[in-house]
Image (cartoon, grey):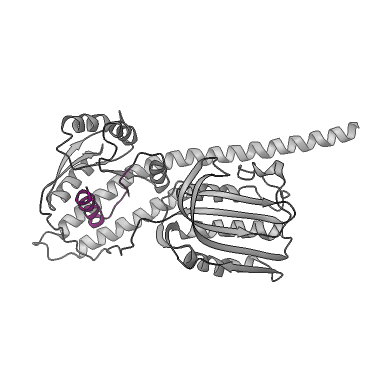
């Protein structure tokens, strides 16, 4: 009995050591993420100024040699890519979202991933006929599909059938298994079903916890489903699991239907023509970077958009309350001293639930979170932004208003 207890104690100590190491690593990544996000915020502001001033120069009819400006824009594009890579490393990265169908994305994923499945496993596909658009990051989407297929493969013991389906679903008052939130609405469903033994009831509520795994230590790290959870929720989606003991498990991922229509971005050699609207648009710009605010004001003045600048949320709220009927739209940054953008929006929403508000954000995951939190944000714009799309967005929102 002493030997048995000693063995169990040693196993428990080893588990504690492993957990401590995992916790330290996650804390390191959290600190790296915190520092990186701060650096990225400042760099994105500077890059936005470079982009805007370059477009202003390109629109000056007296400038005939645009080659130096195009080189500046190309260099800025490379800097933006580097910031994106840093944020990706820190798990905060802006997602390279594209608008496509799940079926197109799945075909690409499966072409890459099929080699991970043995020939003894049959992969059955059933795709929706009426295909809807979704907004996804293809690389992260591939990771999610890979995680689900590997789990299904292991659950089947490398034999049997794995079924992948897509469908449009109208859901009402379902509870997400991973975040426990109730959700309703129209979603695009992607399900992966295996013919394994199912998940024990005692484990079902733990499968999305970091480092939890029903496999042995050599088989898995326990982070696969956590990756799935984080990605789906970063898009505003949810997860359901149909668990049948000794008959298999079906993971159903629910993606929001895209509201976007794809349009090609102009490259560095494209000259943007800043058109004049029929009436003056009055904008309240809330931005703590005075240089960026001045550049935005100069850019928008070329399209007959009058910009009033506030340096933080507190000043922005005061200006809005003083001239509620004057402004057509508010554009605000989030990270600012005294009062951030989200807090300002919350206060404005208590007065006017539908006033047009555009939010600048440093990385996409925050943007989607703000939308989800019920702030009724009209549009989220990623820094650094495309000048033409920014101007078009402002005009479009004010016209709809």
258 sits left or right of 125 in the view: left
- Spot occupied by residue 228 in the image (x, y as percentages of width and height): 55, 51
Q: Residue furthest right?
A: 1
Q: Which residues are magenta?
A: 377-401
- Spot occupied by residue 311 in the image (x, y as percentages of width and height): 23, 34
Among the 4 quarters of the image, the one containing residue 74: bottom left
335 sits left or right of 308 in the view: right
Report the front residue among 65 and 144: 144
In the figure, 351 relative to 84: above or below?
Answer: above
In the figure, 321 relative to 195: above or below?
Answer: above
Report the front residue among 294 and 328: 328
In the figure, 168 relative to 243: above or below?
Answer: below
Among the 4 quarters of the image, the one containing residue 62: bottom left
Is residue 322 one of those drawn in magenta?
no
- Spot occupied by residue 268 in the image (x, y as percentages of width and height): 26, 63
User: How many badges with numbers are in the image?
Assistant: 0
55 sits left or right of 167 in the view: left
- Spot occupied by residue 267 in the image (x, y as percentages of width and height): 28, 64
The quadrant of the rendering that contains the N terminus is top right
Residue positioned 48% across, 62% down in the render: 102
Is residue 380 one of those drawn in magenta?
yes
Report the front residue among 37 and 162: 162
Residue positioned 34% across, 57% down in the render: 260
């Amino acid at each position: 009995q002493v030997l048995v207890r000693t063995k169990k104690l040693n196993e428990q100590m080893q588990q504690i050591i492993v957990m401590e190491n995992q916790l330290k690593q996650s804390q390191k990544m959290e600190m790296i993420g915190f520092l990186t996000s701060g650096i990225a915020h400042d760099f994105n502001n500077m890059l936005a100024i470079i982009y805007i001033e370059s477009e202003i120069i390109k629109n000056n009819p007296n400038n005939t040699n645009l080659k130096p400006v195009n080189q500046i824009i190309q260099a800025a594009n490379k800097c933006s890519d580097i910031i994106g890579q840093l944020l990706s490393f820190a798990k905060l990265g802006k997602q390279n979202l594209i608008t496509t169908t799940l079926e197109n994305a799945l075909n690409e994923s499966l072409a890459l991933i099929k080699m991970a499945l043995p020939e003894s496993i049959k992969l059955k596909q059933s795709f929706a006929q009426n295909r809807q658009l979704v907004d996804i990051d293809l690389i992260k989407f591939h990771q999610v599909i890979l995680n689900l297929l590997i789990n299904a493969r292991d659950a089947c013991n490398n034999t049997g059938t794995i079924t992948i389906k897509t469908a449009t679903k109208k859901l009402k008052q379902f509870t997400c298994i991973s975040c426990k939130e109730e959700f309703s609405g129209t979603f695009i469903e992607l399900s992966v079903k295996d013919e394994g033994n199912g998940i024990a009831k005692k484990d079902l509520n733990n499968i999305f916890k970091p480092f939890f795994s029903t496999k042995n230590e050599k088989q898995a790290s326990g982070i696969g489903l956590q990756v799935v959870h984080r990605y789906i929720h970063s898009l505003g989606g949810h997860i359901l699991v149909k668990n049948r003991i000794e008959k298999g498990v079906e993971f159903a991922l629910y993606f929001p239907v895209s509201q976007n229509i794809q349009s090609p971005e102009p490259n560095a050699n494209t000259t943007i023509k800043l058109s004049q609207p029929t009436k003056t648009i009055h904008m309240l710009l809330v931005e703590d970077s005075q240089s960026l605010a001045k550049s935005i004001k100069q850019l928008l003045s070329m399209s007959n958009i009058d910009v009033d600048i506030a340096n933080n949320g507190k000043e922005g709220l005061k200006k809005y309350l003083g001239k509620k009927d004057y402004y057509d739209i508010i554009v605000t940054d989030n990270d600012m001293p005294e009062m951030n953008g989200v807090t300002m929006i919350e206060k404005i929403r208590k007065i006017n639930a539908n006033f047009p508000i555009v939010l600048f954000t440093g990385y996409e995951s925050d943007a989607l979170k703000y939308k989800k939190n019920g702030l009724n944000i009209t549009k989220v714009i990623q820094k650094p932004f495309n000048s033409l799309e920014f101007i078009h967005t402002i005009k479009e929102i004010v016209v709809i208003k």
